Image (cartoon, rainbow, N blue to C red):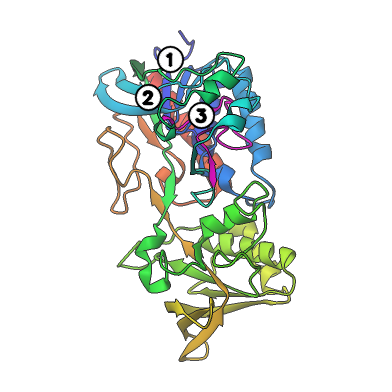
Amino acid sequence: MNTMTKQPILVVGAGITGVSAALEAAETGCDVILVEREPAIGGRVLRNHNYFPKLCPPACGMEINTRRLERNSRVRVLTNTRVTEANAGADGWSVKLASAPAYVNDRCTGCGECAKVCPAKVPDPHNLGMNETTAIRSPHVDAWPTTYTLDRSACPADCKACVEACKYEAIDLNASAKDETVSASSVVVATGWHPYPLEKLTELGGGELKNVIANVNMERMVAPTGPTEGKILKPSNGEPPKKVAFVQCAGSRDVNHLPYCSAVCCLASLKQAIYVREQLPEAEVTIYYIDRRAPGRNEDVLTRVAEMDGVKLVKGKVGKIEQGQGDGLKLRLEDVEAGQIVETEADMVVLATGMVSNLVNGDLPMNLTKDEDNFGLDSLEQKVIVAGVARRPEDVAACVRDATGAAAKSVIAARRA
């Protein structure tokens, strides 16, 4: 029993926001249950090559947090777990949790012998399906917990290669799912976001033209652990592009797609323009934008990119992308400053797709109050606090600050239980 509240605080989602909120609440003396549906914590932050404001790898920041988790016995971390039912009461919440079968248990040392003999291949979720990996594997190089995960449905019939290779008896192919019901004094919803589907942007070639990719795909491409081992290459032929175009507000600020600004897309493209110029100094980069939004100290990045040789920032809305000559692309846009419709070409186009709240599908059974864009709203009466991109689009630094505030509010709400 914790000394601060009658029951633990439940944090749903273990991305950077959820992890930060859980640690901040625990370090005030509260017990915390941190629930994550994926096999490892860290969320989408760990899919970034670099992040703002320092343009450094996110793994270092997450490593600090995992060490804090390892030292703090007040936080119970449940991965591969979902909330399946939640009922509010006078003293808090009764929440039913469903944990997927633990085919690989905590005896796993991460030695990797099982992956060496695994014959089954699956699209790599960490790399957004851009390459294949073995069915049994570490979720990614920075994964915590370090226990391997297994896509059981991909296993060939009667295959036991991984079991036979594991000398620690850490693999049970007959493991079953587990359910439990927990009580919570308050709930922090930190369920995060997903990118707007590329396939819905057909007018921009999304899902149809090989050399049109999303900003999240570019981020994985340039990462050393990504599908191309850090090389920026055209998907059509594996060659480096000579002309790269970044299209801002791809599906954002658009009544046919997302009506809102996702806050970080301009910065993401500016960052990725730096990636291109550093790796391919001969490549030409053009960023097509409606408005240039780089608030606060991040304006320094905008100034840096605007002054770089080989980079142009063009105020104009791209309305159509079609196949050009060979594997090239043809862009049709309104050049606002020139006051005319123009056509131009590129070898590869990166669409700055927006952030969609993971609350949009109603997968969290809590009857949350949401705004018109499906971002969650706090309910202090019900002791529910919404944090990070579940609440509004924002960058990593803002999510961490938001998590601290959410932790404080959850502790206050919990004390009222």
Q: Does the magenta stretch include residue 116?
A: no
Task: Label 1, secondary structure: give it.
Answer: loop
Q: Quadrant of residue 191?
A: top left
- Residue 79: x percent and y percent? 47, 26
Task: Label 3, secondary structure: give it.
Answer: strand
Q: Identify the mark nearer the N-term, 3 or 1.
A: 1
Circle 1 is placed at which residue position?
5
Residue at 57% x, 46% y is: 47
Q: Which of marks 3 and 1 is in front?
A: 3
Q: What residue type is labelled 2?
A: Ser
Rounded to the nearest whole Å, what is the CA distance between mark 2 and mark 3?
30 Å
- Residue 174: x percent and y percent? 40, 18
Highlighted range, magenta: 132-152
Q: What residue type is labelled 3?
A: Thr
Rounded to the nearest whole Å, what is the CA distance between mark 3 and mark 1?
34 Å
Rendered image: mark on residue 186:
2
Circle 3 is placed at which residue position?
149
Q: Are marks 1 and 2 in contact (CB under 8 Å)?
A: yes
Q: Identify the mark nearer the N-term, 1 or 2.
A: 1
Secondary structure mostly taken by the magenta-highlighted segment of the chain: loop
